Image (cartoon, rainbow, N blue to C red):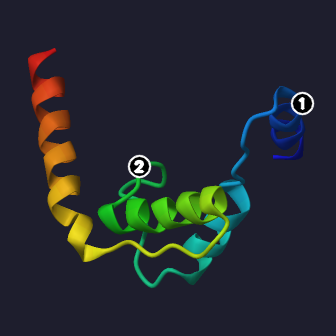
Amino acid sequence: TKATEAAAKEAGVAFVDLFHPTLELFQAAKTPLTINGVHLTPEGNRQLAEVIATALLGRSVSASASMEPLREAVLDKDNHWNNRY
C-alpha cells in the first residue's frame, strides 16, 4: 500500500487505503463479509463503500437506507448488461 500511495501522490491523484481498513472490518465482523473469501456480500460492499466515501470526503459517512432504491436500480442494470453481453 505504501508504494501505491506514493505512486498516487506522485501522479497527483487521490489514494484510498483499502487494505488496512478491510483487515479491521473482516476481524470485527460477526458474519463473513465475502461469499468466497474474495467477492463481497451486500453487507461487505456496504461497509467498504463507507470506508471509501469516508476517505474521499474526509468525514465519517454511513450508508443510508434511502439509497436502497438507487442500489437496486444499479444491480438491475448490471444484471441486464451481463445477461445481454
**Quick one: 65 or 45, which is closer to the camera?**
65
Position of 76 with respect to 57 (left or right) is: left
Q: Secondary structure at mark 1?
A: helix
Q: Residue at x 35, y 57 (%)?
A: 35
Position of 61 with respect to 39 (left or right) is: right
Q: Residue at x 14, y 60 (%)?
A: 69
Position of 68 with respect to 13 (left or right) is: left
- Which of disc 1 and disc 2 is earlier in sequence? 1
Looking at the figure, which quarter contains the C terminus? top left
- Which numbered mark, 2 or 1, is in the foreground of this view? 1
The residue where tag 1 is placed is: 10
In this view, 20 is above or below 79? below
**Few, some or many residues within 10 Å of mark 1 (<14, 14–19, 20+):** few
Q: Residue at x 15, y 54 (%)?
A: 72
**Where residue 39 is drawn, which disc sits there?**
2
Q: Position of residue 4 (x, y in %)?
A: 81, 37
Q: Amino acid at mark 1?
A: Glu
**Where residue 74 is drawn, which disc sits there?**
none
- Mark 2–mark 1 CB contact (< 8 Å): no
